[in-house]
Image: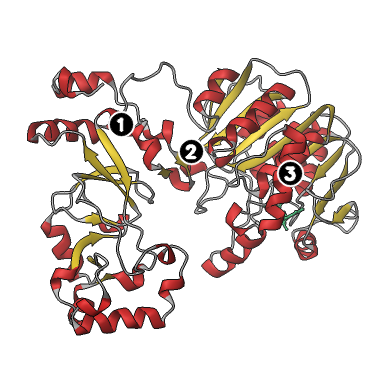
């Protein structure tokens, strides 16, 4: 099997940040060719890419057309003319890009119906989109799918909606999108509309090792959709080998071949796929009637609004001369907890490494009542403009810290290492990288038994059912979703937690 070459993404953080602003991440050839193969469907066609960029899909289309003896024309749009200069550098001819219009696809779309649309739309998260544009996007949602979508829908979602409305009868669309397309708050309405107006042929997902965008913090999925009567079933694929032709060959076979390795293919009921979430594995049977919320309450960690001011190292506290009793021990980064338990030793070793573990936890008494050194420090904070910062400005007085009882367990919910539960033996206060887990019963034995359930692999395996997925297999879980984590009933039985303590 031929290995398909791919060019590297820029490595520096600064360059990546610039690309993030414009949503410019180029699609690798092995992905682009598979997507183009689907939309061309072995016909002479005009291929349309609404976000041409450096032309990955145009190059792929030329390659596929050559391989299959097709006559194709290329057309598309992009807001950024400099991206097209890169397209030439990457080997396209001026003729190839002569059908590209510089303009905004969402607000100035083509006026004709299209038969083959392929895209890696700009992934610009909602908080980078100006408010006025966001309002216009919401109206587009209302006009096309009959609903205003939740404000967290990014530009890529409206690219998909706009492109689907432009599909001619029988036309095909292949989009590579981040997993929030089917995990976001807006996903239900979006997919209700798609699934009642189009055929979802396939959803392609990737193992972290085979990600089309290695090192980028998103979990990408490919959607293959046709303008045709909806079907009850669709194919769900997990691709576990990158840079090979397996995916393209599978698409080219009309999804008929079953590759020996590299792809796991499952036929799923559309209704099941939509209720489980298209980014997730099929749920063969509902795992349990019991959820974590039966046993615990979940609260997010402390948001300081300015960690650099409120969260300090031991040396900083000494240098400032603020008395110890104004601090609580806290933990800020998930990386700071490597083990499954936070003990006094963990804190000592973080302190020795110069990591912050002291949170300035003031209760909101008047400034004048504090010792001089603390007063001086707060004045410094005022001079830095901290009281005007968004989160801090909501606190009265501005230096009053959110308070938490030290939770029995923490949940580390976003990190390169897998999401996991941590036992908080040192009774620290977690910041926002963690969730606080409070058992509903403080009986010692209950807590021991609960701990066995929490760190059992069968429990953590269920996290994908309720979390949002990012790159490298990381899963982010909000407090309310974590309470919905299914706890396998067999584990509850084994744990020996008495029936009356299960709080069902
Ligand atoms: C993720 S890149 C994909 C480029 C290319 N198709 C690929 O897959 O390698 C998205 C492209 O969309 C362009 N873009 C951003 N906003 C746009 C808009 N409103 N209309 C059209 N293009 C846009 C960006 O300039 C960028 O080149």
Q: In this rendering, is residue 272 above or below 414?
A: above
The residue at the point 69 percent across, 48 percent down is 121
SS class, disc 1: helix
Examine the image and state in which quarter residue 7 appears: bottom right
Number of numbered discs visible in the structure rendering: 3
User: Which image quarter has ligand 1?
Assistant: bottom right
Q: CA distance from mark 1 to mark 3?
A: 37 Å
Place of residue 33 in the rendered image (x, y in percent of width and height, measured from the top left): 71, 40
Label 1 CB sits under 8 Å from any ligand 1 atom: no
Q: Which residue is mark 3?
A: 139
SS class, disc 3: helix
- Indicate which disc residue 293 carries: 1
Q: Quadrant of the N terminus?
A: top right
Q: Which residue is mark 2?
A: 207
**Chain-order first, disc 1 or disc 2:** 2
The crowding category of the residue bearing disc 2, from other C-alpha atoms within 10 Å (few below 14, some 14 to 19, many at least 20), is some
């Amino acid at each position: 099997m031929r290995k398909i070459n791919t060019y590297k993404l820029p490595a520096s953080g600064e360059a990546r940040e610039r690309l993030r602003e414009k949503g410019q991440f180029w699609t690798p050839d092995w992905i682009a060719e598979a997507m183009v193969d689907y939309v061309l469907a072995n016909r002479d066609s005009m291929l349309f890419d609404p976000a041409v960029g450096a032309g990955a899909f145009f190059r792929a289309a030329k390659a596929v057309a050559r391989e299959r003896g097709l006559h194709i024309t290329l057309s598309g749009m992009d807001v950024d003319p400099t991206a097209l200069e890169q397209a030439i550098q990457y080997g396209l001819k001026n003729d190839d890009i002569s059908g590209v219009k510089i303009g905004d696809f969402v607000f100035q779309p083509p006026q004709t119906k299209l038969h083959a649309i392929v895209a890696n739309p700009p992934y610009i998260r909602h908080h980078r989109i100006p408010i006025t544009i966001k309002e216009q996007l919401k109206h587009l949602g209302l006009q096309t799918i009959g609903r205003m979508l939740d404000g967290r829908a990014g530009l890529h979602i409206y690219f998909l909606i706009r492109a689907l409305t432009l599909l001619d009868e029988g036309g095909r669309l292949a989009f590579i999108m981040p997993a929030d397309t089917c995990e976001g708050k807006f996903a239900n309405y979006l997919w209700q509309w798609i699934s009642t107006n189009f055929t979802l042929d396939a959803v392609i997902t990737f193992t972290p090792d085979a990600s089309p965008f290695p090192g980028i913090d998103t979990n990408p999925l490919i959607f293959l959709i046709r303008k045709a009567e909806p079907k009850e079933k669709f194919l769900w694929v997990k691709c576990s080998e990158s840079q090979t032709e397996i995916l393209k060959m599978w698409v080219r076979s009309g999804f008929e071949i079953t590759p020996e390795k590299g792809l796991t293919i499952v036929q799923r009921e559309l209704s099941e796929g939509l209720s489980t979430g298209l980014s997730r594995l099929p749920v063969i049977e509902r795992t349990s009637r019991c959820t974590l919320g039966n046993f615990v309450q979940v609260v997010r960690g402390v948001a300081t609004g300015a960690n650099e001011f409120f969260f300090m190292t031991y040396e900083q506290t000494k240098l400032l001369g603020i008395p110890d009793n104004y601090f609580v021990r806290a933990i800020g980064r998930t990386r700071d907890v490597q083990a499954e338990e936070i003990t006094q030793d963990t804190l000592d070793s973080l302190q020795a490494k110069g990591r912050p573990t002291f949170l300035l936890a003031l209760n909101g008494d008047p400034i004048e009542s504090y010792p001089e050194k603390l007063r001086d420090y707060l004045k410094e904070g005022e001079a830095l403009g901290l009281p005007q910062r968004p989160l801090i400005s909501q606190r009265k007085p501005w230096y009053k810290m959110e308070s938490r009882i030290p939770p029995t367990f923490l949940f580390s919910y976003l990190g390169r290492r897998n999401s996991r539960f941590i036992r908080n033996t040192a009774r620290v206060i977690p910041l926002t990288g963690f969730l606080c887990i409070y058992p509903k019963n403080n009986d010692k034995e209950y807590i021991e038994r609960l701990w066995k359930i929490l760190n059992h692999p069968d429990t953590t395996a269920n996290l994908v059912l309720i979390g949002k997925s990012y790159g490298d297999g990381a899963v982010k879980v909000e407090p309310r979703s974590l309470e919905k984590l299914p706890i396998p009933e067999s584990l509850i039985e084994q744990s020996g937690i008495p029936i009356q303590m299960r709080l069902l």
